[in-house]
Image (cartoon, helix red, strand yellow):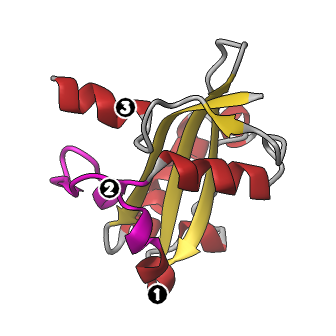
């Protein structure tokens, strides 16, 4: 089985974002309770009251396809900022910094290798342990597209 890693990216939270997200959640629930309830049931939703949503936790986003399917799958994992040094050997591109207007909850992001993403997806049981990379290089497909542009 082959797995194409479209994206593997770490986002680093902006200081104070958890409090902002809690406020937005309260406001959204007051104005649109049924829509908020549906939104909060989505598998990708991270509750601002959870420990993973605090200002001291990195989010690692994964986007991938298991061939021969053409359905893009998404997942995420979390890592305390104090352990971010463990990701250094897996970085494969530049840091992207964001203004508060561009990305209100994140300060910056950076890509990780396709092999790291595959190992994590295998570890979490999202793909079989005998799966191999379909990527031509160890960079996620989105990084290859950026290089070509």
> Do residues under tags 3 and 2 come within 8 Å of each other at their CB atoms?
no
Position in image of residue 142 (x %, y %): 37, 31
Region rendered in magenta: 87-112
Q: Is residue 114 left or right of residue 111?
A: right
Which residue is at the front of the view, 82 or 28? Answer: 82
Which residue is at the front of the view, 49 or 93? Answer: 93
The image shows residue 70, relative to residue 107, as above or below, that is above
Residue count near mark 3 (Cα–Cα under 10 Å), binned few <14, some 14–19, many ≥20: some
> Do residues under tags 1 and 3 come within 8 Å of each other at their CB atoms?
no
Position in image of residue 138 (x %, y %): 44, 44
Quadrant of the drawing holding the N terminus: top right
| Residue position marked by numbered label 3 in the rendering | 142
Q: Quadrant of residue 139?
A: top left
Q: Residue drawn at (43%, 50%), measured in percent from left and top?
A: 9
Q: Is residue 128 left or right of residue 105?
A: right
- Does 44 lie within the magenta span? no
Measure the C-alpha gap from mark 2 to mark 1. Answer: 16 Å
Secondary structure under the numbered disc 3 in the rendered image: helix
Measure the C-alpha gap from mark 3 to mark 2. Answer: 12 Å
Residue count near mark 2 (Cα–Cα under 10 Å), binned few <14, some 14–19, many ≥20: some
| Residue position marked by numbered label 2 in the rendering | 110
Secondary structure under the numbered disc 1 in the rendered image: helix
Residue 82, disc: 1
First in residue order: circle 1 vs circle 3: 1
First in residue order: circle 2 vs circle 1: 1
Residue count near mark 1 (Cα–Cα under 10 Å), binned few <14, some 14–19, many ≥20: few
Which residue is at the front of the view, 29 or 68? Answer: 68
Q: Residue drawn at (69%, 28%), measured in percent from left and top?
A: 2
């Amino acid at each position: 089985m082959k797995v194409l890693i479209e994206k593997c990216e770490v986002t680093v939270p902006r200081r104070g974002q958890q409090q902002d997200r809690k406020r937005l959640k309260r406001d959204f629930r007051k104005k649109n309770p049924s829509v908020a309830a549906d939104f909060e049931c989505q598998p990708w939703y991270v509750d601002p009251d959870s420990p993973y949503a605090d200002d001291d936790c990195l989010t690692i986003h994964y986007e991938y396809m298991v061939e021969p399917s053409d359905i893009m799958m998404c997942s995420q994992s979390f890592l305390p900022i104090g352990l971010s040094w463990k990701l250094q050997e897996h970085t494969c591109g530049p840091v992207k910094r964001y203004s508060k207007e561009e990305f209100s909850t994140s300060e910056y992001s950076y890509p990780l290798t396709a092999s790291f993403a595959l190992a994590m997806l295998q570890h979490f049981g999202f793909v079989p342990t005998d799966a191999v990379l379909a990527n031509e290089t160890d960079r996620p497909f989105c990084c290859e597209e950026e290089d070509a542009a």
